[in-house]
Image (tube, helix red, strand yellow):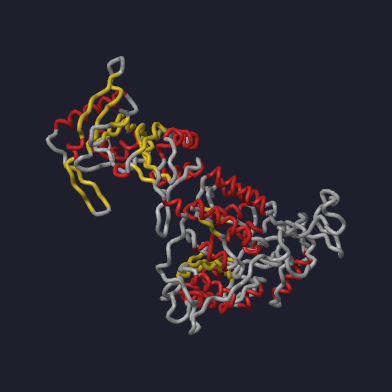
């Protein structure tokens, strides 16, 4: 309601924003975010243009929670040809009666048609979003949630593939400036009872999963959603009682909030209870453009289970937001109408790109016997431009990893490099199959917190570039602590060749501790063997780690003190995290937890089987 009148961004504006965002972030996924994306009048036109770019650059397109029937199946077909993302539909309620109460405009037939189109184009997973605790809701409406989920699961009919359906329950929270701003929110115990009732309906059902929002968190949301200015003191008191990161489930705790409410003399039940129509509300002095008379009329229509058409494409209901012949908008007019607006083009009005949505519903494809035609479970992989599969040139990119970048995990490093390469407009080559990915490979994963002057990754491009140009493009786009040191062309056979040994420098926080570390290395070097057991995914593994120490030496400062220990780790007989190796050598100096915090480790070189090393 508060976003009325509807104002759609122009296609030119959206495409400009899109290009700028992709070029500056390097992300590989686009999502069109809106409260009602499927109702954007030119969604099909926009999507087709964007999907062309997605195909060229291997970018996926996802749409947020959609109103059923609000997306053209031609868009679905084009999206299926790219990387397939998840689909979330929002029936909101299980029964048609309750969907009419909330003016959802969704029918069971439309929901099943949408599910059939997803099945037809190869989707096998769908998420359905429901609210519980809606006005006039009964237990019959709750059991209908499981019924509609079963129907969606079996939308293909007897013998056809089943959809894996995940239903998500969210308790209804009344909000200001809506037709339900006067109704009460159900309490925690009742929320839990209704969740349990739906859970019972899902037990033993194959291909059906149920998730739900924490009742206590929804209760707090209800307390805050319609509060007055007295709630400011409650928020501060709750914060001082430790209510921090409250929206994170692992940090959420309701008692501090209830204590703060009690200290401020505010009843939680009064906050979530009903409001009297006509009485002053905490937000009555704010103008959202929607009249209270209109909200009350819509409230009565809801209770009478009457649908109100979308005013963008249907009749005006005189909500107060737009300038009409009957009356001007309730919102302030910042300036007089411009020449472009004219007397027939009022200042406050719905501004749409197209007078009607450029989408249309299509019947599902049926075979001669009337059964739904679905892509098989092993549907064809996403289509990928042939150009992107060409392996024109391969490089090994040497880089440093220091300062804050040392705390990037291997998975985070891959994401950082993927985005940096896209921002650099590198002509990336991609793998084929169901999940095309840039052809990148890496050296051994560096432990988090360990710095390096000699890291590398292998890069494959579908268009050859001079090594210096690769370095110059990439260097300014890496995070602090990462710098391209050298780019060298490599043959395919050596693209992922790993070093057989690596050189390190170890430092401790004090000279005395570093000297003690040098003594530990001296003792370790004298051992005939050192058996070490570590836990792996395949169970305990024991190896002689004495063989991993090829050489070592202390480094002295000008004063003669030991300032560092340098050593070469030999991985010819097996690999061990260099940080774990150091903790094993220094085990007499403290526990692994203590040592992990005090060891400063820097990789200085990698040595290959043919004797070559980097740096040379």
- Inspect this view and state whether residue 197 appears: no
In the image, residue 359 sits, relative to residue 8, either above or below, namely: below
Q: Which of 434 and 179 is in front in this view?
A: 434
Residue 217 sits in quarter: bottom right
Task: Tell whether 579 sits left or right of 196.
Answer: left
Residue 344 position in % (x across, y down): 85, 59
Q: Nearer the viewer, residue 455 or 193?
A: 455
Q: Which of 580 and 462 is in front in this view?
A: 462
Task: Tell whether 613 sits left or right of 86.
Answer: left
Task: Tell whether 162 sits left or right of 282.
Answer: left
Task: Tell whether 540 sits left or right of 397.
Answer: left
**What residue is at 41 percent from the left and 60 percent from the top?**
434
Residue 131 position in % (x across, y down): 58, 68
Residue 96 position in % (x across, y down): 61, 77
- Please identify the residue farthest to the bottom as the structure is shown: 369
Q: Which of 40 and 519 is in front in this view?
A: 40
Position of the C terminus, as image quadrant, is: top left
Residue 261 sits in quarter: bottom right
- Inspect this view and state whether residue 350 appears: yes
In the image, residue 452 sits, relative to residue 205, either above or below, namely: above
**What residue is at 76 percent from the left and 69 percent from the top?**
296
In the image, residue 199 sits, relative to residue 516, either above or below, namely: below
Residue 347 position in % (x across, y down): 81, 55
- Please identify the residue farthest to the top as the structure is shown: 559
Task: Count every numbered label the image shows and give the total.
Answer: 0
**What residue is at 41 percent from the left and 74 percent from the top?**
206
Position of the N terminus, as image quadrant, is: bottom right
């Amino acid at each position: 309601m508060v976003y009325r009148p509807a104002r759609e961004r122009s296609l030119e504006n959206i495409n400009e924003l899109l290009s700028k965002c992709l070029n500056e972030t390097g992300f590989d996924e686009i999502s069109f975010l809106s409260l009602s994306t499927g109702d954007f009048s030119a969604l099909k036109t926009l999507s087709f243009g964007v999907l062309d770019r997605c195909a060229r650059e291997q970018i996926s397109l996802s749409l947020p929670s959609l109103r059923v029937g609000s997306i053209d199946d031609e868009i679905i077909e084009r999206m299926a040809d790219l990387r397939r993302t998840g689909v979330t539909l929002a029936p909101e309620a299980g029964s048609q009666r309750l969907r009419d109460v909330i003016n959802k405009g969704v029918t069971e037939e439309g929901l099943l048609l949408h599910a059939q189109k997803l099945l037809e184009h190869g989707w096998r997973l769908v998420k359905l979003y429901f609210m519980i605790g809606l006005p006039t809701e009964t237990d019959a409406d709750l059991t209908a949630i499981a019924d509609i989920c079963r129907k969606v699961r079996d939308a293909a009919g007897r013998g056809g593939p089943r959809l894996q359906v995940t239903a998500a329950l969210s308790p209804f929270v009344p909000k200001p400036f809506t037709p339900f701003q006067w109704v009460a929110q159900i309490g925690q115990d009742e929320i839990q009872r209704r969740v349990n009732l739906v859970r019972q309906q899902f037990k033993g059902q194959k291909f059906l999963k149920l998730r739900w929002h924490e009742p206590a968190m929804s209760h707090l949301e209800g307390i805050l959603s319609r509060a007055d200015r007295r709630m400011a003191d409650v928020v501060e008191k709750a914060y001082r009682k430790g209510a921090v990161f409250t929206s994170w489930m692992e940090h959420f705790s309701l008692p501090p909030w209830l204590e703060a409410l009690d200290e401020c003399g505010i009843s939680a039940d009064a906050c979530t209870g009903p409001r009297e129509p006509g009485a002053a509300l905490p937000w009555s002095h704010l103008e959202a453009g929607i009249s209270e008379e209109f909200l009350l009329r819509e409230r009565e229509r809801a209770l009478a289970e009457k649908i109100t058409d979308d005013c963008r494409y249907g009749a005006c209901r005189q909500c107060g937001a737009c300038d009409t012949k009957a009356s001007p908008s309730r919102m302030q007019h910042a300036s007089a109408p411009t020449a472009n607006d004219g007397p027939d083009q009022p200042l406050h009005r719905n501004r749409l790109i197209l007078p009607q949505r450029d989408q249309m519903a299509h019947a599902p494809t049926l075979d001669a016997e009337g059964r739904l035609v679905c892509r098989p479970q092993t549907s064809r992989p996403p289509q990928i431009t042939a150009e992107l599969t060409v392996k024109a040139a391969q490089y090994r990119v040497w880089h440093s990893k220091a300062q804050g970048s040392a705390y990037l995990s291997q998975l985070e490093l891959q994401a950082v490099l993927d985005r940096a390469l896209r921002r650099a407009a590198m002509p990336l080559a991609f793998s084929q199959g169901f999940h095309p990915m840039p052809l990148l490979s890496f050296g051994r994963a560096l432990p988090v917190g360990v710095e390096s002057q000699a890291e590398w990754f292998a890069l494959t491009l579908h268009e050859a570039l001079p090594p210096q140009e690769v370095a110059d493009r990439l260097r300014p786009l890496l995070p602090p602590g990462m710098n391209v040191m050298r780019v060298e062309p490599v043959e395919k056979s050596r693209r992922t060749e790993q070093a057989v040994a690596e050189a390190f420098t170890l430092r401790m926080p004090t000279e005395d501790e570093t000297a003690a570390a040098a003594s530990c290395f001296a003792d370790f070097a004298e051992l005939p063997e050192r058996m070490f057991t570590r836990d792996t995914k395949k169970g305990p593994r024991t190896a002689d780690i004495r063989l991993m120490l090829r050489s070592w030496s202390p480094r002295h400062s000008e004063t003669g003190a030991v300032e560092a220990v340098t050593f070469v780790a030999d991985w010819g007989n097996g690999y061990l995290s260099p940080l774990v190796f150091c903790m094993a050598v220094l085990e007499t100096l403290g526990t692994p937890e203590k040592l992990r915090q005090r060891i400063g480790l820097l990789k200085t070189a990698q040595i290959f089987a043919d004797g070559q090393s980097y740096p040379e």
